[in-house]
């Protein structure tokens, strides 16, 4: 039994070495598959080389659901009434994106260092927002009309419905340019390899929507101290960090 296992191991090693020795990168003459984990979620993809200097890859990314909770200001609360001037807003994020990337290897077969560029495709909606104003039931009808339009989310107004509930979504560009760099090939010389990648997606400025309409803007709000304001106003680039297990199929 031990001899059989040893013979199989030696044969597999010899096959892998022969496969690597015979490997030559032509124009789409090989096919690779990869599995990644990183800030884009869990990713799977396929790739093909185009000489020693180029690789083309297609991928799909599954981002698991996460939630972000942060208070927003309620500016219409009269002083001294004993009502809360905050509302807890919960943002839920779960999405699937696709990407097309070209990896350029400036040193050819002498190095696995690469520079990547491409596009990421996904839905415009990044966060689904929801919140309930806890003191809504204590307000008089007149006070409710005042408070209804006074939720501050950065420079946007977030409106309450008849039950004191706020809902909406944050949106960015559906097509996001990408640039990055790293080490490793999506179609490795051996049957199995590894790749590390660091880059960023350019999302553009996020906008707040309610009932599929962009919310009203009031520049006097601009609450730059809250986490939601920092997210909406400043997060225009999404960082990408990926660790990838690569394999060569053909």
Image (cartoon, rainbow, N blue to C red):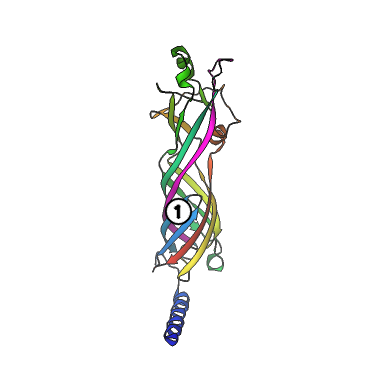
Please indicate whether residue 137 sits to the left or right of residue 79 in the image: left
Farthest residue in the right direction?
Answer: 225
Percent coordinates x, y for residue 131 in the rendering: 46, 30
Q: Which residues are magenta?
A: 54-81
65 or 44, nearer to the observer: 65
Q: Quadrant of the C terminus?
A: bottom left
Pick whichever, 150 or 143, lies toward us. Answer: 143
Q: Secondary structure at mark 1?
A: strand
Q: Compare residues 171 and 102 and report the one nearer the observer.
A: 171
- Above or below, 107 against 211 in this view is below
Residue farthest along the top direction in this orientation: 142
Q: Residue furthest bottom?
A: 3
Q: Residue at x 46, y 12 (%)?
A: 142
Tally of numbered discs:
1
Where is residue 96 drawn, in percent x and y?
41, 47
| Residue located beneath label 1 in the image | 42
Q: Is residue 250 above or below residue 149?
A: below
Q: Is residue 165 left or right of residue 153?
A: left
Label 1 neighbour load within 10 Å: few <14, some 14-19, many 20+ = some
Say which residue appears at 46% left-offset and 60% top-offset: 55
Image quarter of the N terminus: bottom left
13 part of magenta stretch: no
Would residue 69 be counted in the magenta stretch?
yes
Give the overall secondary structure of the magenta segment. Answer: strand
Rendering coords of residue 239 (x, y %): 54, 47
What percent of the width, then of the height, locates residue 149? 47, 20
Give the camera-side residue of 63 and 208. Answer: 63
Question: Can residue 178 be seen in this snapshot?
Answer: yes
**Residue 154 appears in the rendering:** no
């Amino acid at each position: 039994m031990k001899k059989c296992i040893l013979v199989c191991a030696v044969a597999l090693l010899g096959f892998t070495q022969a496969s690597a020795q015979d490997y030559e990168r032509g124009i789409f003459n090989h096919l690779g598959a990869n599995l990644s984990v990183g800030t884009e979620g869990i990713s799977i993809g396929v790739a093909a080389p185009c000489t020693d200097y180029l690789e083309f890859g297609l991928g799909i990314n599954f981002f698991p659901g996460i939630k972000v909770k942060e208070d927003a200001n309620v500016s219409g609360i009269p002083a001294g009434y004993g009502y809360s001037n905050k509302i807890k807003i919960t943002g839920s994020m779960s999405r699937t994106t696709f990407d097309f990337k070209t990896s350029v290897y400036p040193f050819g077969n002498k190095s696995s260092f690469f520079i990547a560029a491409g596009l990421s495709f996904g839905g415009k909606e990044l966060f689904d927002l929801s919140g309930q104003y806890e003191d809504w039931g204590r307000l008089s009808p007149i006070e409710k009309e005042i408070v209804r339009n006074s939720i501050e989310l950065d420079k946007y107004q977030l409106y309450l419905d008849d039950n004191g509930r706020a809902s909406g979504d944050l949106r960015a560009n559906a097509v996001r340019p990408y640039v990055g760099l790293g080490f490793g090939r999506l179609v490795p010389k051996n049957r199995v390899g590894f790749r590390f990648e660091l880059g960023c997606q350019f999302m553009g400025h996020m906008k707040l929507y309610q009932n599929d309409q962009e919310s009203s803007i009031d520049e006097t709000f601009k609450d730059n101290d809250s986490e939601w304001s920092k997210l909406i106003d400043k997060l225009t680039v999404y960082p990408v960090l990926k660790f990838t297990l690569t394999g060569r199929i053909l």
